[in-house]
Amino acid sequence: MDTRDAVAALAALAQETRLAAFRLLVQAGDGGLAAGEIAQALDVPAPTLSFHLKELANAGLVASRQDGRNVIYRTAYAAMDELIAYLTDNCCHGGQCLPKTAAVATAAKRRAKTQERQP
Amino acid sequence: MDTRDAVAALAALAQETRLAAFRLLVQAGDGGLAAGEIAQALDVPAPTLSFHLKELANAGLVASRQDGRNVIYRTAYAAMDELIAYLTDNCCHGGQCLPKTAAVATAAKRRAKTQERQP
DNA sequence: CACACATTTTCACGATTCTAGAATGATAGA
DNA sequence: TCTATCATTCTAGAATCGTGAAAATGTGTG
């Protein structure tokens, strides 16, 4: 994940409704949630939610699939993982944040070598 | 760190110039950097940088101190740690992101009990 | 095919954010 | 005190973002 992607992911999460929607999807797990369910749970008009889900999708943080006439959204854990790896690696130089987070920084570096997931 | 703080921190980092400044400060380490040095390094006009540094400071991600006629900024590692803890805890439910990041989630929970740093 | 329903797209408006020139405040040295 | 330097605040214009009504698209059912 490069800086451009990181800024996009951070911007996607830096909005109350979107963060709430994302957290809801994380809670929902791999099964995901229909757009309507999210809209109802968050008490947000459908068009507004659709706008935000699109933002999250553009940032690669969620994926969608059609299920009948519903659209099911689910979190893309890989993207979230990459974001956290970016933060621990670039913004916690040498694991200065917390001793325990240093372990992740190294995991992040290892991931960087493996590279290429989602095109 | 509650959701409000998390959104503020994410918003603070979700901007190219601010993320670049923050990364620079992380690289600089505990010694920090003068506002002018950052402005020069990033090739950004002083008023623009000042605006962004203020945003970072408001989000609690950086701290400043006066040193002669310079103002030295340094990263507030605790805040960054809390942000990462929030993300791993709330957006990687059960460490689904990556096996290795699960360790951090537990560290985050442990931190939550310890609580209270910076007022 | 016609209908009902879920979602997305389009559009317009107001609010917020980003940018940088000009002016102001603070500090050190002559 | 005067001057130079560094940083911030003031200000205004441009750009971006968030919102929700109305219309359009797609999907399953009768």
Image: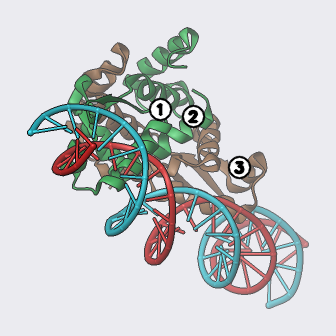
Chain colours: A brown, B green, C cyan, D red
Which badge, 2 or 1, is on the more N-terminal residue? 2
Chain that bears disc 2: B
Q: Which residue is tagged 3?
A: A38
Marks 3/1: CA–CA distance:
31 Å
Q: Are marks 3 and 2 on the same chain?
A: no
**Foreground: B61 or A65?**
B61
Q: Is residue B74 left or right of residue A76?
A: left
Mark 2: which secondary structure? helix
Mark nearer the viewer, 3 or 1: 1
Q: Residue at x 47, y 59 (%)?
A: A58
Q: Nearer the viewer, residue B20 or D10?
A: D10
Rendered image quadrant of residue B38: top left
On residue B88, the disc is: none
Cβ–Cβ under 8 Å for marks 3 and 1: no
For mark 2, what is the residue?
Answer: B5
- The residue identified by callout 1 is B60
Element marked by disc 3:
helix
